[in-house]
Image (spheres, grey):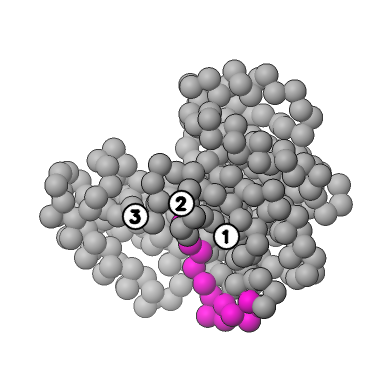
Amino acid sequence: MENSIDAVVVTYNRLPLLKECLAALLSQRGKLSGIFVINNHSTDGTTEHLERINDSLVQVITLGENIGGAAGFEYGVNKATSEGQGNYVWIMDDDTIPNVEAASVFLEKAALLKNDFGFLCSNVRWTDGHATNIAHVSKDWPDKINQGLVGVVAATFVSIFVPKDNIKQLGLPVGAMQIWGDDTEYTTRLSSFKKSFFVSDSVAVHKTGYNLMEDNLKTIQADRIWRFKAMYRNLIYVKRHYGSKKDVIKMVLANVVTGLAAITARDHRLSRLGAALTGTWNGFFFNPAIKYPTDKAMEKEIEN
């Protein structure tokens, strides 16, 4: 389908939000050629609900185990690029609720830019209307602001719009990153290839339990500390590959300072410090392979 979109939604045990996400996507079905739902082995009734959906637009892949968020996106983007009929892949979590105009605005901006961009991202808001998942702006960010476009270099997988040609040339998200930072790496890879933009009129609500801008190592719940460890590793990798030596040094120092500050936390102080230090150290030895669409070996490994 010419100038249409294949959406990728990765879900795990958030059925009420998944229902909202799919309803929001189906409300703009005229712009979509497919919705690829990657069910990461949910156990909350998601699997049964998805089995009852009778809509040719929705393609459900239920995995035999939870492979993690990053690997879920790697797998889903591969599926959508290899098997979908659209020209673009629209990436999102299951708690992303795009507004009814989000897809059409993306297509309008893609046409305006003559498809010469790395990625586009939505104007993401939390449930109270405040900004969340804020993209990192580029040095020349105001250049196209009169056209509703702000230059960015990185964003999160909360409504990311990518031409399939870019995916075929640059590869898939890195599944080995597990969580937190895989989206930064992928969008940085894309923006290093071509200029990328925040689209002010493409609005999506990120229905998290709280505004994620409040997350920090010192106060995060103990069972989520491991996510920071993965993030520090992943972001050191990003700086090593796309930044300068100065950028790497600055990030190392910032991570150490953050880890030391976490010693004053109420609980799990050493675990918090260890997440910062170990994650940072691991980042210097982390060199995962980038896979490309139609990697049948990857599909066989996951599906079995």
Give me the residue at 38% from left, 62% from top: 236
Mark in front: 1 vs 2: 2
Q: Secondary structure at mark 2?
A: loop
Residue 220 vs residue 301: left or right? left
Mark in front: 2 vs 3: 2
Residue 24 vs residue 123: left or right? right
Question: Of all residues shown, which one is farthest toward the right?
Answer: 2
On whether residue 140 falls in the magenta region, the answer is yes
Circle 2: residue type: Asp
Q: Report the front residue among 114 and 75.
A: 114
Residue 304, given in percent of the width and then of the height, sits at 58, 24
| SS majority, magenta | loop
The quarter of the picture where residue 73 lies is: top right
Q: Which residues are magenta?
A: 132-145
For disc 1, the marked residue is 123
Discs 2, 3 touching: Cβ within 8 Å: no
| Label 1 vs 2, first from the N-terminus | 1
Circle 1: residue type: Asn
Distance of label 3 from label 1 (alpha carbons): 18 Å
For disc 2, the marked residue is 128
Residue 268, given in percent of the width and then of the height, sits at 17, 44
Q: Secondary structure at mark 3?
A: helix
Circle 3 Cα neighbour tier, 10 Å, few/some/many (<14 / 14–19 / ≥20) = few
For disc 3, the marked residue is 214
